[in-house]
Image (cartoon, grey):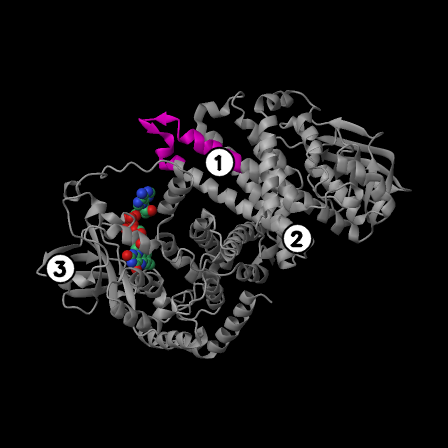
Amino acid sequence: MSILYDEGQQAIATESRRVLEARMNKDELLPLLETTGKFHDGFWTTAKEQGWTALALPEAYGGLDLGLVELGLIAHQAGRSLSGAPFLTGSFGAAKAIELYGSDEQKAKYLPGLASGETIGAIAFAAGSNALPVLPSVTLTDNCLDGTSTGVAGGLAADIAVVYANGPGMPVLVVADLANVTRSAIDSFDNSRLYADLTFAGTPADTLVIGGTAREAALHILALQAVITAHEQTGGAEAMMEIARDYAVTRRAFGQVIGAFQSIKHRIAELYGFVELARANCIHAASREGQADFVTAAAAARISATEAYDTASRDCVQIHGGIGVTWELGLHLHTRRARSLAIEQGNLLFWEDILVDRLTGEAA
Amino acid sequence: MSDLEAYRAKAAAWLESMVPTFGKEARKGLSVEEDLAVARQYQRAKFDAGYAGINWPVDYGGQGLGHLEKVTFDSEEMKHGFPSFYFGISLGMPIPVLMQFGSDKDFVKTRVLKALKGEEIWCQLFSEPSGGSDLAGLRTKAEADGNGWKINGQKVWTSWAQYSDYGVIVVRTDPNVPKHKGLTYFWVDMKAPGVTVRPIKLVGGDSHVNEVFFDDVKITDDHRMSPVGGGFAVAIATLMIERYVATDSGGFGPHLDLFVDLAKNTELNGKPAIEDGRIRQQIARNYAMRSGLQSITARAMALMQAGMTPGPEGSLNKLVAVRSRQKLSELAIDLQGSGGFAYDDHASQKEDWTASWINAPTGRIAGGSDETLLNTIAEKILGLPQDHRPDKGVAFNQIPA
Ligand SMILES: Cc1cc2nc3c(=O)[nH]c(=O)nc-3n(C[C@H](O)[C@H](O)[C@H](O)COP(=O)(O)OP(=O)(O)OC[C@H]3O[C@@H](n4cnc5c(N)ncnc54)[C@H](O)[C@@H]3O)c2cc1C
């Protein structure tokens, strides 16, 4: 059974929306596209101030002991205003990995910094086109990492990373300090996500999970991040749907507003369907944290949210006609974000396979 | 266990006990008439067990329970393929409308009880050759005749009219005013002189819909269920009643599990089809879509239970689910390759891909076409403009035919 938001949760949604709408605007976001290595630090400052970084972490380590449902609501607003720094998910995922699989000592070392937002975390699981490779390209020998993790979101700014690596003959999940790691910035279509390849060379690492369960643990962390990202995507899709609607009731052609043409009107109504299905799956997935079907629910949320954001950003531009493709209007900020979020945390193909594995017990 | 879960468990057990007598196997090979006779017994059994009119007033023979109990029972009942569809329209719209708008309470009570017991069936005579989506475009007319009315014209797509005892009908009583304003709502005796019912055979081979002709059919004024000229509002109320009838994220077609079974048991390029990316993608996307609809429904139920009103997103159910059922059914037939030609017109749409596929277009039209549903979402939820309506404000008889 799905949840209903209570008053406290509704307040989180309203307040985060108010704060983000007041502090974020596209004129600050557009220039970020033209440089590599900069993100909107106003967002991260806001996240720290508002306690969003601490929200879903344990009280014992400076957290607020809330969960995915609450963080999801904030991510939804972040998606609406395009504000989200990549650490919203990366720091959260890294902290969850340490909380769930780390020793008391490791938790005490990392979690307070991650909760306060002073430490920025990242997740380095991917190797090339594989979000969670069967054979990780990074290796762990004598507690030191070697090799390259590709396309790490937030990788240019992160202080620590949770890395999925190949230990001596078995997978491991470790946490590594990135101070002395070589970062090579990726010039991206969505530069403010700070994508980087991280090259480890004898980098010391703390082991979280070793052996057969490491992959399952990594998938679980990816699923937690996927649910947050899915909320962000749904927020973005919702914004695109609303922007399309607002334009359709003002722009006129052939003597009437374009929203009166069914080709436009029905398209926006279809977007409503995509957005609401994604939202429903997101709420459901967030409420399933800790349950046996969590990964299944996360995959469904991820699939519908990716479809929703891609479709809504595509159609919103089309509905605008020529003005839709200008730099200035900034709709492309959403187009870009829709695609970058579609790849972060594993693409559609990845989640479709995970989902079908779970549903049928059959791998591809 | 919550009260509702206890209710579900009890209903499920009772339904299970009905399977040997009223399930698909028991009814195999029956003609429609024989099946309807069995269906009437099933409806009577439901009535006796307290599962008819679950959320209707006790005064009228209902159970006086909530909407949640009704939805819970329906979703359990749907699993078994019982012959409840004969009464779907009757108990779905006309009878609730009769309870709300019928003037002679004794008459209403008698009818409601007989309908609940499966003894009488009602149909809904709205659509016409000239007015389907455009309900107010209908031309069947009723003229004042002494102290009553005389009906002439033709209705179409009337489900179960051939087995109906009564029907609710919207007719034009004044062609000199704009189309919405000249309509009046009545009930009619389907066995009255001048009523002719002619079944229409549908693509799936069945003939549950009909043309209904009215030739000087005389009714008294106490058949009237709306003010004269006020029929459109009651017609809309009819369509709104049962807004929360049981939804089915499978679009009233097969469950996704059946597709997975098929994909596991079918070979594609010498390997199980379940390993094929195209098949996996469809399973994944269908699952995501269906789970989204289920979450929407679950939240709507939770809201209702908490005494709140669900959001408008429930309106997506039929639109999204039936379209996807249509496509998934096509893929299931594709998967069977040359084994996919076989067709059994008695097969269940919920279990057989071909039966599901051939009947899916019906679901995209009946009860509001995809296009009109999109219009409703666009206009009522998103605030987009109404379509251009050249007939707006024009007297009906001045609209070019
Ligand atoms: C199996 C079945 C059972 C039915 N049972 C009943 C019943 O019991 N009682 C009853 O009264 N009716 C019944 N109907 C009728 C049903 O409600 C109508 O068929 C339906 O509303 C569509 O109307 P139409 O068939 O006249 O199509 P039309 O209205 O002629 O539509 C033709 C096409 O035009 C499109 N269209 C129409 N208006 C618009 C618009 N504004 N914008 C965009 N596109 C538009 C439609 O979507 C469709 O694609 C039944 C229909 C079926 C198929």
Q: Give the residue type at disc 1.
A: Met
- In terms of secondary structure, what is the magenta stretch mainly? helix
Quadrant location of the N terminus of chain A? bottom right
- How far apart are the two marked residues, 1 and 2, measured between alpha carbons? 28 Å
Helix, strand or loop status at disc 2: helix
Mark number displayed over residue B149: 3
Front residue of A339/B307: it is B307
In this rendering, which labeled residue sits more in front, label 3 or label 2?
3
Q: Give the range drawn in magenta.
A: A238-264
Query: For the image shown, how many numbered marks are present on the structure?
Result: 3
* A275 to the left or right of A39: left
Q: Which residue bears the numbered disc 2?
A: A294
Mark 1, chain letter? A
Q: Give the residue type at disc 2.
A: Phe
Q: Which residue bears the numbered disc 1?
A: A241
Q: Where does residue B60 sit, x and y in percent of width and height? A: 34, 69
Q: In this view, does A215 lie above or below B124?
A: above
Q: Where does residue B82 sit, x and y in percent of width and height? A: 43, 71
